[in-house]
Image: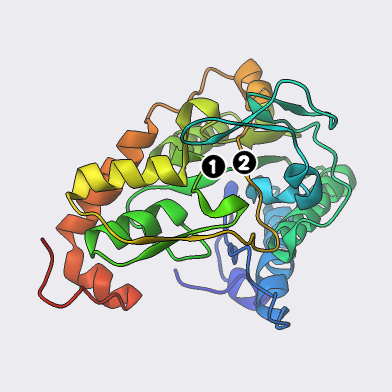
């Protein structure tokens, strides 16, 4: 059924629940920076509260899809990096705890600003912990890195890997923004099907996952810089697009984010099974199979003369 998490009376129409996967959110890191914070806050925080109340009604197991954006920006910008040919790497020696070349762990300090998006998701995490303590509500929190795959409507500020493939498919220009404009900033990525596999495991064994807060991402093994993403997109589409270097870094951006999932891996034998190349291949095949509807939905115009 269709409904709005901001409207508790709409949620109340649902029949009794055994479990709830709460993944409703405004996920753009740029949301709210123009001064209009209402939609962001009421979707991500009020919506989470309303969903918690619904889960409490039935004692339902609560699976919350949070984000790596709960980790503050400033400490990540100040991390010690090593510059390789196509990407930045995290150095072995760091002044901040919870960081290794494998990525950022759940022990990373949470003091500091993290974008309004990240703050609303962290606030929801804190609400979940209170509901567990006060009402015995079973819950697990998954702090996801970049989720990617078919059916993600990629834009400049959210869904970067789909956005990159769309630009190559339709031969539209791109920009390497920030950190010198070389395209060496890095994100890990997790195929949506791998995330679904994890959520299914959690739904099937609530008692095993209750009370956990876990990073869930592709990690170092499934990560790409923008420059590396460009090469794969060029190869898959056969198209080369103009990419403008922009040296100035956007507020709230970080040079590297990799999910250190050691805590999750110690608990369960779930692992990401689909490579970064497979993620981009699946996105490419989806765009090719439904090109006209995707272009219309995202208001994308192919260049004059058509595609090569």
Q: Which image quarter: residue 52? A: bottom right
At which x and y percent is residue 175?
Answer: 45, 61
At which x and y percent is residue 38?
Answer: 71, 80
* Label annotation for residue 256: 2
Q: Is residue 250 above or below residue 295?
A: above
Mark 2 packing: few (<14 Cα in 10 Å), some, or many (20+)? many
Q: Which image quarter: residue 249? A: bottom right
Residue 60 in sight? no
Residue 216 in sight? yes
Mark 1 packing: few (<14 Cα in 10 Å), some, or many (20+)? many
Q: Is residue 4 above or below residue 106?
A: below
Number of labels in the image equals 2
Q: Which residue is mark 1?
A: 187
Per the image, label 1 sits on a secondary structure element best described as strand
Task: Tell me if 224 is positioned left or right of 8 in this view.
Answer: left
Q: Along the polypeptide, which appears first: circle 1 or circle 2?
A: 1
Q: Is residue 207 above or below residue 70?
A: above
* Label annotation for residue 106: none
Which is nearer the eye, 49 or 55?
49
Query: What is the quadrant of the N terminus in the image?
Result: bottom left
Distance, label 1 to label 2, CA atoms, is 6 Å
> Residue at (41%, 51%) from the top-left corner?
161
Task: Tell me if 132 is positioned left or right of 230 in this view.
Answer: right
Per the image, label 2 sits on a secondary structure element best described as strand
At which x and y percent is residue 143?
Answer: 65, 42
> Residue at (47%, 65%) from the top-left corner?
156
The reply to whether the C-beta atoms of the residues labelled 1 and 2 are less than 8 Å apart is: yes
Task: Tell me if 77 is positioned left or right of 205 in this view.
Answer: right
At which x and y percent is residue 183?
Answer: 49, 48
């Amino acid at each position: 059924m269709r409904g709005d998490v901001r409207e508790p009376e709409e949620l109340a129409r649902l029949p009794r629940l055994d479990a709830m996967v709460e993944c409703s959110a405004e996920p753009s890191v740029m949301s709210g920076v123009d001064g209009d914070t209402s939609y962001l806050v009421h979707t991500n925080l009020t919506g989470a509260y309303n969903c918690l109340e619904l889960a409490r009604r039935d004692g339902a197991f609560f699976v919350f899809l949070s984000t790596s954006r709960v980790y503050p920006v400033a400490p990540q910008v100040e991390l010690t990096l090593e510059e390789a040919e196509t990407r930045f790497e995290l150095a072995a020696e760091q002044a901040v705890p919870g960081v290794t070349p494998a990525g950022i762990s759940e022990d990373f300090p949470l003091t500091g600003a993290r974008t309004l998006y990240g703050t609303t998701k962290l606030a929801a995490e804190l609400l979940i912990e209170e509901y567990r303590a006060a009402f015995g509500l079973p819950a697990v929190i998954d702090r996801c890195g970049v989720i990617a795959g078919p059916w993600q409507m990629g834009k400049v500020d959210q869904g970067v890997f789909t956005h990159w493939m769309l630009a190559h498919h339709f031969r539209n220009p791109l920009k390497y923004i920030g950190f010198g404009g070389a395209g060496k900033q890095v994100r890990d990525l997790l195929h949506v099907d791998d995330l679904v596999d994890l959520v299914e495991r959690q739904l099937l064994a609530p008692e095993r996952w209750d009370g956990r807060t876990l990073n869930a991402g592709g990690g170092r093994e499934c990560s790409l810089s923008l420059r590396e993403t460009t090469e794969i997109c060029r190869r898959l589409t056969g198209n080369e697009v103009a990419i403008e270097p922009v040296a100035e870094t956007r507020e709230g951006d970080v040079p590297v984010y990799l999910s250190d999932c050691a805590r999750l891996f110690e608990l369960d034998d779930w692992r990401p099974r689909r490579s970064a190349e497979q993620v981009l291949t699946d996105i490419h095949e989806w765009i090719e199979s439904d090109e006209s509807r995707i272009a219309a939905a995202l208001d994308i115009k192919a260049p004059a003369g058509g595609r090569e």
